[in-house]
Amino acid sequence: MTRTRRRHRQALRVACVLPLLVVLEGCYYMQAARGQLEIWQRREPIGEVIADPATDERLAQQLQMLRAARQFASEELHLPDNGSYRSYADLERDYVVWNVIAAPEFSLQPRTWCYLFVGCLAYRGYFSPDAAADQADALRADGYDVYVGGVAAYSTLGRFDDPLLNTMMSRSDADLVALLFHELAHQVLYVDDDTAFNESFASAVAELGLVEWLAARGEQGELERWRQRQAQLAEVMRRVDATRDRLADLYAEPLPEDVMRRRKAALLENLRRDASGKGNDWLAGALNNARLVALTMYRGQVPAFRRLFARCERDWACFSARPSAWLTCRPKRATRRFGISRIASRLLARGRRLRRRQSAASRSPGRAPTGGRTRVRRLVLPWMRQWNIVSAVITRRT
């Protein structure tokens, strides 16, 4: 089969599958689209919100700080300089979305949901807590461990100009700035089908960037307090990792389910007791496999990114300015471990395709492509444009 025929056949499959997905997933994508539209409708420029006499004084101070942090992120951390996080939206609720995370009762491998254009994610996001609760109930009925967590912010990966949200403002100043850096980092690097990688990268950028931000402002006291909280979190995560290892060993044993269930409950209770002695509430609420997945999703690979930053000699241009520049400074061992070769090959292939198109255009200026490829493009691209709008909503939750 020729390459052109294969492409035509693949495009035809896409065109056939899309209407089916609209039928099967229509309700989910419609709620995502409505939620995103609500955010857009409520956006206001930060300057106007700050200047409004009706704005709460504390909120105005937070927005002024975040405006300065946004500038710092672009100038010093080489994070994207675009329209994201230069506006504000008050959604009049505590969270922007609620994420549902699920894992089998005797497994730490999360259930995934796959979406067009953003790959597979280890969570399902809803703009309504009732919809998230319904999904959680359905998963529990199927035998899954389930965790539902409210989300303060999410990123559309630079497709749209995301605003700052009222759901973010309950955090301390340091955590608020870190969240801003975290969301901007998702615009720098995003790998399909690898939620833990993406979240760990963004968490590392947030952590390293906040240290630079506080040091630049001379806020040594706040920096020390933040480092103490991070040390406490690191200790909790070490206990979580140890419990995960014990659970993985337990699930690999050929035991009756009731015995495995009792031992699992004992391990989780030990984890809760050990963590509660650290004077924090990071493990408050129900503990199960899904909750452990949620915890490690954001922190599991952060130490590797810290080492990478050190190998880049703390150079932000190397670490996060562009995916291509970031990839060139990856050590070979880390490249194998995190599958960076997949990203590199995709970037290179994308560059080759772009160069071929530019070369063809230069040879035939003003001439549009002809033949079957044009017909395929006309068939598929309108669908892609529509689905890009609704699929961007579920790209990420923080």
Image: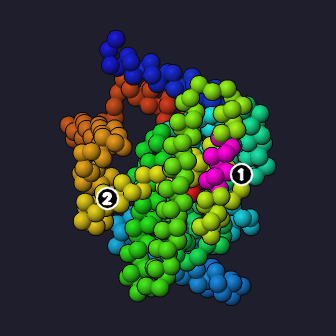
Near mark 1 (Cα within 10 A), the count class, few <14, some 14-19 or many ≥20, is few
Does residue 162 appear left or right of residue 147 in this picture?
left
Instruction: Identify the magenta region.
Output: 264-272
Q: Which of the two discs, 1 and 2, sits closer to the camera?
A: 1
Which of the labelled discs sits on residue 307, or is there none? 2
| Circle 2 SS class | helix
Q: Nearer the viewer, residue 335 or 161?
A: 335
Measured Cα–Cα span from mark 1 to mark 2: 33 Å
Provide the residue designation for mark 1. 286
Residue 145 located left or right of residue 181: right
Check disc 1 and give the amino acid type. Ala
The N terminus lies in quadrant: top left
Compared to residue 18, the image places residue 99 above or below, namely below
N-terminal-most mark, 1 or 2: 1
Question: Residue 274, how many percent across, how many down?
Answer: 61, 59
Q: How crowded is the residue under tag 2: few (<14 C-alpha within 10 Å), some, or many (20+)? A: some
Indicate the quadrant where residue 169 lies: bottom right
- Amino acid type for the residue under numbered disc 2: Arg
